[in-house]
Every structure is written in C-alpha cells, then in structure tokens.
Amino acid sequence: MNQLFARLGLIKSAMPAAATLQSPAPNRPVEPAMNALSAREMFNRVGMLPVLIMMYIAFYFLTRYFSEDGVSNFMSMANSMNILRQTSINLVLACGMTFVILTAGIDLSVGSVLAVAAVLGMMTSLPQNFPHLALPVFLIAGLLMGMLNGVMVAGFKINPFVVTLGTMTALRGAAYLFADGTTILNRDIPSFEWLGNGDFLGIPWLIWIAAAVVLISWFILRHTVLGLHLYAVGGNPQAARLTGIKVGAVLMFAYSISGLFAGVGGAMSASRLYGANGNWGSGYELDAIAAVVLGGTSLMGGVGTIWGTVIGALIIGVLNNGLTILGLSSFWQYVAKGVVIVLAVMLDKWRQQQASTN
Amino acid sequence: MSQIVLEMSGICKRFGATRALDQVQLQARSHEILALMGENGAGKSTLMKVLSGVYQPDAGEIRLGGEAIRVHSPLDARKAGINLIYQELSVAPHMTVAQNVFMGSEPRGSFGRVDQKAMRERTQAVLDSLGARFSPDVLAGSLCIADQQQVEIARSLIHKSRVLIMDEPTAALSDRETERLFEVIRKLRSDGIAIIYISHRMAEMTELADRVTVMRDGGYVGTLERSEAKPDRVIQMMVGRPLGDFYQHKNGRTPGAVRLEVRNLASRKIRDASFAVRSGEVLGLAGLVGAGRTELARLIFGADRAQGGQILIDGEPVNIREPLDAIRRGIAYVPEDRKGQGLFLQLSALANTSMNVLAQNARGGVLQHKALRKLTEDAIRQLAVKVPGPDGIVGGLSGGNQQKLLLARWLAIRPRVLILDEPTRGVDIGAKSEIYRIIHELAMSGVAVICISSELPEVIGICDRVLVMREGHINGELSGDAVSQEAIMALAIQSPVATVQ
C-alpha cells in the first residue's frame, strides 16, 4: 500500500498544480551491490595514475643508472617543475580537446590555431602597433578560429575530422602568410612577458595558467548544465535532441573553447620564446589528442574526465623529459612515445575489461 | 525420436557481489521447442551467454549429446553446433546476403580466393529451405528486419546447428512477419534442431513451445510440459505470486476538457491527421508497423517538421518547431527506440533521469547536485527501479528498469500531454504491469496520454479510445464496446469502405 501511495505521490508531482514533493520513505534499503560497485568505481577513477607513477619512478632509476656519478636529480623539485612547465601548453590544448572529443568530435586544427594566434599577437605587440592589446588579440583570435570550426561542424553539419583537417591546413598557411615566412621577434613585451617567464609564489605562471584552465574545464564539465549536455550530446545525439538539448549550440561551445584555449597556448608559447613564426605549434594537435586518449576519454564520445586528461598530459610530459635527460636522440624519442601511448591504452583497456567482468 | 541434445546442470555465475545464476538447469531436446521464460533480470540472457561461450560459468556442467563440453568462446560454441541469434541483429548492411551468411567461414577456391559461386549457391539452398523471398546477391542493409533475421538464421544453419537459441526474435517484427518466422522455426524443429526460444510474449509461448522452463532471480523455478503450461501458471512461476488481471487499470477515469487537439497535420508520411485527446484520457494509436504512428507522434513533438496543420493545447494554437518548444508546452515523448533515441547508456541514472530538468535544478547554470540526487533517489524509489544508486550506469540495466528511468525523466517535467511509443517493448511482465499502473495513475491525475502500441491486448486493455492508422492516415476511431482485436485489425489493413462490404 505504501508503494502505491508513493507512486501516487510521484504522479501528483507530475501535475502542474500540485507541486508538493513526496517525502522519502523512512528506511532506505541497503543495497549489497553498492559496495562492490564503489570499489570498482574507485578502480575506474584511478585510471592511468598508476602508469604515471610507475613511469616517474622508472625514469628516476634509469637516469640514476645511466648517470656518470650514480646520482639522479630527475625527482628533484627543479626538474619536477620543469616537467610541469613543459607540459603546461599541451595540457591547455588537451583541455580544449577534451571538450571536443567528449562530443564525439575531433579538433585537428589546434596547432595551427595556436600558430595564427601567436603570430597575430606578436605582430600586435610590436612597438609601431598596439603593444598593450597583444594579450586580448591572442585570445580573441583563438576564439574566432574555434568558432569558425564550430559553425562548420554545428551549422553546416560537416564531419569534424574533415572540417578541422581543412582549417588545420589553411590556418597553417595563414600563419606563414601573416608572418611573411619569417619569425617575428620582440624582446620588449611588458604586457605579457610575465606569462611565459614570470613566477608567482615560486611557481611559474605557465603552470598557474594551465592549472586555471584545468579547474575551469573541470568545473564546466562536472558542475554545470552545459557540462552534462556535453556528455549527453557525445553519448547519444539523437536522444539529446529529443530531450530538448540544443545540440548545435553545445557543439559550437566545444569547438569555440578549444579555439580559445589554443589562443591561450599561443600566448604562452609566444611569451616564453619572445617570438612567433608560421611553424609554431605544428604537431601539437597530436600530443593533445594523445593526452586525452591516454586519459581514458572515449573517441566515440560521451565518456571521459578532465582529470584523466591531466594524467595523460603528465605521462607525455614525464616521457619527454625523462627521455631527454637519458640523452636519447629525438628520433628515438618519437618511437618511444608512440610505443608508450599504444601500450598504455592497451593496458587501460585490459584493466577496464578486468573491472567489468569480475 | 525426441532425444536430449543439450543438458545444463548446476550452472552458477557471479558478477562481483551479484549472483546472476544460481544452480540453474536446462534440457533441450531434438525435434522440440523449449521456451525459456522469466522476467527481465531473471538470468535468461546470462544463461544463454554461458551456453554460447560469452561468459565462463563458475560452476556447473554442460553436456552436448551426452558428452561434457567446455565452451570457452563463441567460436567453440559455433563449432559444437550451438548458435545464438541475438535480439539486436548483427548483419553487415553493406555486404550481400551471401557474404553475410558465410562471414568468417568463406568457402575457399584455388589460390585462397573466395569461391563466390559456391557461396551463392549454398546460400540460395539455405534460403530456399527457409522459404525466404530474397536473393543472395542483395545488400543485407536493404532488407527489412524480418528478412535480416532470416539471414542470421541462414548463417547458423550453414554451421550444422544442433542447438539454436533465439533471444526475443519477434521484438521488432509485425504480426505477419512473426507468423512467417514461426513457420521457419517449426520447420527447423521438424529438421531435428533443438530450439531454445526466449520471449516475453505469452501468446508466443502458447503457440510455439513444446516445453517451458521458467527462471526467476537467477534461479531455476521449474519446467512444464505443453499441456501444463497455462499462461496463468507460467506467470505465477515467473513473478512468484499470482498476478491479478493484467489490464485492470482503466476504471474510474473521467476524461475532462480537450487538452491536445491536432488539426490537419501533414508531412511527407502523414496525410491530414486530425484528432483530440482529453485530459485524463488514454488514447491508443494502433496500426501496423510503418503505418505512420511514430511519425505522427514525432510531428506533434516537433522532432520532425510538419508541412501543414495546426496543434492546439488547451484550445490555444501553439507553434512547435523543435522538441524544446514541445517540452516547454508540457508535451513529453518517450520514444520507441529506448537505447537509440532515449537513454544515454554511458551516463548515470542521475544524468538520465534529470536531463530534462537541469535548468530548474541549477543556479546560474551551476548544477545543484543535492537537489538532483534527491530527485533521482525519489524517482528510483517511487518507480521501484532496480539500480545500485543514482550513480549507477544505465547501460547495464535490464529493459524494464531502463524504461522506468526514461519514464522518470519525462515525469519530471510534469507533463500535460504524455506520448508513449511502445512503452512496454522488451519489458518483463512485472515492469509491464507497473507501467500500466503508472499510465493509469497519470491519467487519473489529469494528464492526456497517447499510447502507441503494436500489442492489441495492451491497446484494448489500457486505452479509453483507439485511433487506427493505415498508410499515414487515421483510418478510423473505435471506442467503448466497439474496441476489439478484430475491429482494430480490420481498420489497420483495409480502408473503411472495404470494412463495410
């Protein structure tokens, strides 16, 4: 009888007039399956963290073994800070990429967007132009290019791979054209020199910026209506539409924020190196995609977290740093990076299978 | 002549803390159709996955032709002559019928090339034996679902099937197609294949089964011979308690004012549809599959664009251009294809139930997790959904529980008009009767309900009035004592003039 009343309660609350909500039943039944699930969930939530930690430790011993005096400063504060700083730009791009991949899309253009934004920003910073407007130009240029991708994907419904392959190529050309084939150098950039070279509380601004981008992304995905809509659109676009979600607007947001973050990345790299040219950021899109995939985000959309992306980006960062300290040639570094990416994802897949069948 | 081909005994299987199968037994005999019945979540599918090598049992024995066997993979099962045809068909749409039938075991000619001729001829032979009416050379994707199913059956026959398992094969078929499928199944039986038939539909069990094995909550309940397997008795075994009349949810309703009115609605597939639903009324929308029922619902909901006509809510004309407009007017639409168009399978119960009311439970776009949790927990409790909690992922739930969560999502908007498209498809008996009760209670509280259904007893049992569609047109209306299976079928298959003659 209680159950019936409870149901009637729900039915009543379904009426516009009766807004009273049903009071919960006194004792919630304890589900035995819940403990098992939360254990499994823990397992899932840790994700690739063990791989990151194992790699970090392995590189410590490797660098110690191969060093001449048997001492390694791989784990030192200075080098750890180095790793974070070297990771920061990729992490910013990877956060934008996470939004796009969650909607089952892809953004191949982030490297080129970064280049165009960097070149335009550096041009603005030249003394004969508007030096104090440089920073907004980086960001607005990135945002506009992201919106261009968004319009074509959401508005014209063209496959995102094709759209961003096109903008990747075209914007790369545009970056060379804007820079006139040379490198724009400017040692005097007071308005944004701090970004790539300054510290705050003993930690480089590059790391603070990356951390802020991560926090903003996490907040959007975890705590906003928009975030849940992103997962919904990626998981089942048809159902999302029938649920009244504006699928086009959600896609537009994903590509725009990816462009904006690429603009932030452009500002970071231009400031760090006091310059920009058409070749800036080439291949960055692949590192960003690798970080997202390493973080367990599904290329099919709808599944993934920003923390996974952080761990994925750090894995790539540790790998780059460790292999460089070991003195491996850059050719071998490419090989090692590719192998580790594929192995890590295989391991992750195996781990998930274990988690779901047992 | 009938002999035991397959014997499973003492089968146990655990997933974490959940005991999915506990000491289950089953016997399949040649020249016989065994119906495997049970509510969703009773363990039927798990048992069949153990049999076909998808899962490994923790304990128990499988004997095939008297010999104990171990099935480590679906390939092992196929080699042993055990074939499973899933509910969701798995034909490759861009390959021909013959290529589909021989996928993975293509006949080889010289130099390792595929022997196209042999493949076609052998496929043709099997198709002939099934009475199929399509050629081995057409693309599988161009066939209707019933024909695609025959392709799958043909695939299993190529492999000298001894045991053929069919999991809800009629879920997506029209009545005529179902009849054809039954002929095929009976023919396979007379060829000596042991058939295990899983279904929720009682009528199919009485029509086909030689014996019935019933499961409940992962355990074995019992097996009945054909003569003992009366629907009442089987239902009682399935739910563990006698079920009152299934459709006693219609009395005491008094329809109020007209809530939704549709005037001359038209699109490419719909011709000139006009009707009205009153508040507190359950209106049935019957007709054959493809008659335009879903299309009409989608027009009202704004999922497709109408080419003409008018929609009025409470007497006021409304302009519905997209689903969001309909939702704002209090129209809810629970689609037929639960997994494809309704649920977000990778997301949690919370996300799935609250997706329509996120804005109401957010401040400045920031979600209020507490409110959402409470909303979800209330819905889970009130609709008696079996899910580990608000964070449980819905992809792993049974059909009935998924349907309840989807229903909860739409009840959360407090609908004024609720359109249900095949609300009990693929749902077990227990959940079915609960859904009927929910529909009734919603109508009692004043909601106007439109219910699309292909199950005639359901339409007759729960609806106050029935519209019958035929070829994109509302072909007739039945109410009161005029509603009968015969009357609905007559309107569904012929024009009204012919009915009179």
Image (cartoon, coloured by chain):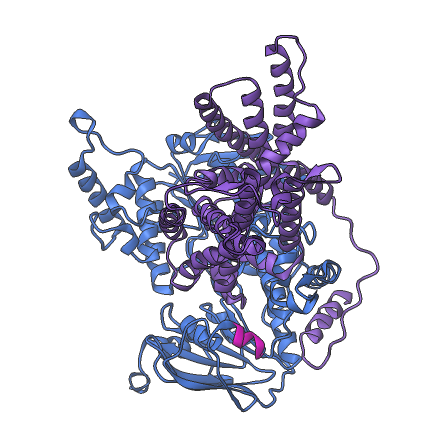
Q: Camera-side residue: A218 or A145?
A: A145
Which residue appears farthest toward the top when viewing the image? Answer: A69
Residue found 58% across the figure and 34% down from its top: A86
Q: Residue furthest front?
A: A128
Instruction: Quadrant for residue B236, please give it.
Output: bottom right
Q: With B374 as the anchor, is A49 left or right in this view?
A: left
The correct choice, above or below, for B73 with respect to A90 in the image is above
In front of the other: B240 or B226:
B240
* Span of residues in magenta: B324-329
The quarter in which the C terminus of chain B is drawn is bottom left
Q: Nearer the viewer, residue A124 or B394?
A: A124
Q: Is residue A277 left or right of residue B57?
A: left
Majority secondary structure in the magenta region: helix
Residue A73: tell me if it is visible.
yes
Measured from the top left, where is residue B425 in percent x and y?
50, 61
Is residue B274 among what the camera can see? Answer: no
Q: Is residue B277 above or below residue A118?
A: below
B76 lies left or right of A20: left
Point out residue B433 in the picture as x, y percentages from the top left corner. 61, 65
Query: Of B125 and B108, which appears nearest the observer?
Result: B108
Residue A301 image point, x, y percent: 50, 49
Quarter of the image with the N terminus of chain B is top left
Residue at (66% x, 57% y) in the render: B350
Q: Which chain is blue?
A: B
Confirm whether the magenta stretch covers residue B248: no
Residue A72 falls in image quadrant: top right
Residue B342, position as x, y percentages in the image: 52, 61
Q: Is residue B281 left or right of residue B160?
A: right
Q: Classify A163 as above or below B314.
A: above
Q: To which quarter of the image does residue A274 belong?
A: top right
The colour assigned to chain A within the rendered structure: purple
